[in-house]
Image (spheres, coloured by chain):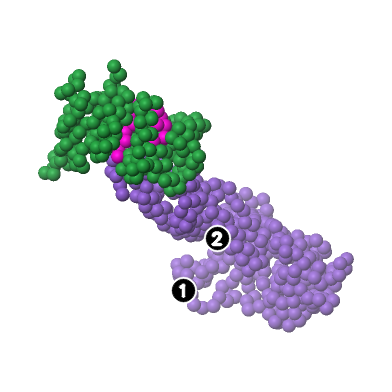
Chain colours: A green, B purple
Amino acid sequence: MSREIIRMSGIVKNYFIGTPNELHILKGISLKVREGEFLSIVGASGSGKSTLMNMIGVLDRPTSGEYLLDGVPVSFMSDNEMSDVRNRKIGFVFQTFNLIPRSNALKNVELPMLYAGVDSRERTRRAAELLKAVGMGDRMRHRPNELSGGQKQRVAIARALANDPPILLADEPTGSLDSATGRMVMDLFHQVHRREGKTIVLITHNPALAAETDRIVTLRDGVIVSDPAGPGKGAA
Amino acid sequence: MFLRENILLAIDGLKSNKMRSFLTMLGIIIGIGAVIAIVSIGDAVTTSLNDTLSRLGTSNIYVFVSQKEENGIGSSSGKIDDSDLISEEQIESFASKYSGEIGAVSYLETGESGEARKNHRSAKITVKGTNAGYGSVNNVKITRGRFLKERDIRNRRKVAVVSDRLVSNLFRTGENPIGQEVSVDTDKGSEDYTIVGVYQFESVSIQGIESDKGKDTRTSLYLPVGLVKETAENQNYSQFVLSTKGVQDAQAFADKVESYFRKLYASNGNYTCRARSMESAISEWTRQLGVVSTAIAAIAAIALLVGGIGVMNIMLVSVTERTREIGTRKALGARNSYIRMQFIVEAVIICLIGGVLGIIAGLLMAWGGVTIMEHQMSVSIPLVISAPVVLGSVGFSMLIGIFFGYYPARKASRLNPIDALRYE
């Protein structure tokens, strides 16, 4: 049995705490993800899935609850510690690609390695290797504005893999792409999942995409309403 | 922290928006340029003045008539006349009393400007009546013949000491000017004088202006003072200079001289006499020039402040424009300090490039200013590119970058990554 890479228990996230407008976005989320799983988190807008993604991606701290990422408690880390955890453990893929506009593909892929302190030559070598692996070997010196949407997302996936993180966190990765390009990007995720055994968490509202994954976690009004491996069903 | 990457990134950023980068830098360019120009010109003038004055002998003492301070400046409306001035007899009796300390005394009556003629050629001159002591007190370098002697002065002999510049303009090469007559034409008429000596003309600075060589520069033509006094308004002197011998503390002796002459002026309602050593005058003038150029430089520095605020403004715009980029960088693992450093480096690069361009502009302005002054005053003012000033300016522009870049950079570094990623 592979080990648990994500273990969340009783995660609560409230906003505007102590004011009359206090919002309860996540109302006690418990989620376990095993290494190598490809799961999707689905839910309507306002269900809290973006907030949950921010929690999983260590971009935000929960109001209460415990989150062990790769065995390390991350709920109450400092900003710097959170940055370091994101850098090494999480590969982000965004709906809007979020490539650095003035940097070429190669520099974009090098960025997480730069923050990890990898030396310049090794950065360039690995970035080039990753870009070739996603089929962007012939466009390494292109800037984002010279790339199509699908090409941008491939660069972004290469960037997400730069520090060889155990988890890829993809937020609507095909949301800005036409269906053919979206298909190509999904195939790339499947390929990364198969070949590299990465844990992939896909946030989407598209049931067809979710259906391609091993496990669908459904969120509604800040609680998990369906999870094949949930606390009630899986081994707690 | 990733200094090389940050510098390359900043330069990429500047290149991608050249007009904006240049306009942002312009404030720094103007500020640094103005400060550099003023400091350089101030230095050049001070150096030139110091050289000139030092050559006249730092142990010399200037004695001059001045208005009594209790009357306030400009309160005496009456014209100064001989009764307010120092007479030759007063000077001579003072000189004989202090003959142990005084090397020579020198007094001067500046006459008309005009032309000296000989061999159907002419040279511009200014007539100066002097006594015999003038030559030694003012270090006049005689190349041929001799300076005016006591005998010439007493007998008002029609003899002249002229500059080598005049000789080369009036006489053929190899011709001996000593003993020859020149005719001197001024507004007061034409007179003939016998040349008894030739002195080495030096333009007001140590290095003469090379391009002036061979030109008809106006030089002094020295005559016995009595000849010039014949047509002068006042027979007495408003100032004289003395050289000292064996005096350790020139200013202390100057004070003694001053109190001697003050006694002579005790009954004069408007005027008194003051004495200063050359040394203290030089340091006083240097100090005052320094104060003036510092004050002007401080005003110029306001331009620099405005430039710095411009940099801060554009950095704040840049932070807003790049909010998503900042969010992305944070998501990819950039610590707050990395983001802060990135923006500070960018501000420093803007200011540094602006500073270097400003130094170049400032030195060009200083060069232009000094060249104009040289032409107008026909003196040589050596413009020195001072390494401390240049390096100081480079360092200071970097400090401006850090100072005015810090707040925008801190703002960038404190952005919440979630909000920043969502920013449209």
Residue B411 in the figure: left or right of residue B145: left
For mark 2, give the secondary structure: helix
The part of the image, by quadrant, that contains residue B173 is bottom right
Subunit bearing disc 1: B
Compared to residue A71, the image places residue A223 above or below, namely: below
Residue B262 image position (x, y, % from top left): 54, 64
Q: Residue at x 56, y 73 (%)?
A: B84
Residue B327's image quarter?
Answer: top left
In the displayed structure, would residue B390 be above or below residue A119? below
Q: Is residue A164 visible?
A: yes
Q: Residues within 10 Å of mark 2 (few under 14, many from 20)?
A: some
Q: Residue at x 29, y 19 (%)?
A: A3
- Residue B416 visible? The answer is no
Q: Mark 1 = which residue?
A: B75
Q: Position of residue A195 (x, y in %)?
A: 39, 26
Disc 2: host chain: B
Between disc 2 and disc 1, whose residue precedes?
1
| Magenta span of residues | A156-172
The residue singled out by tag 2 in the image is B259
Quadrant that contains the C terminus of chain A = top left
Q: Quadrant of residue B216?
A: bottom right
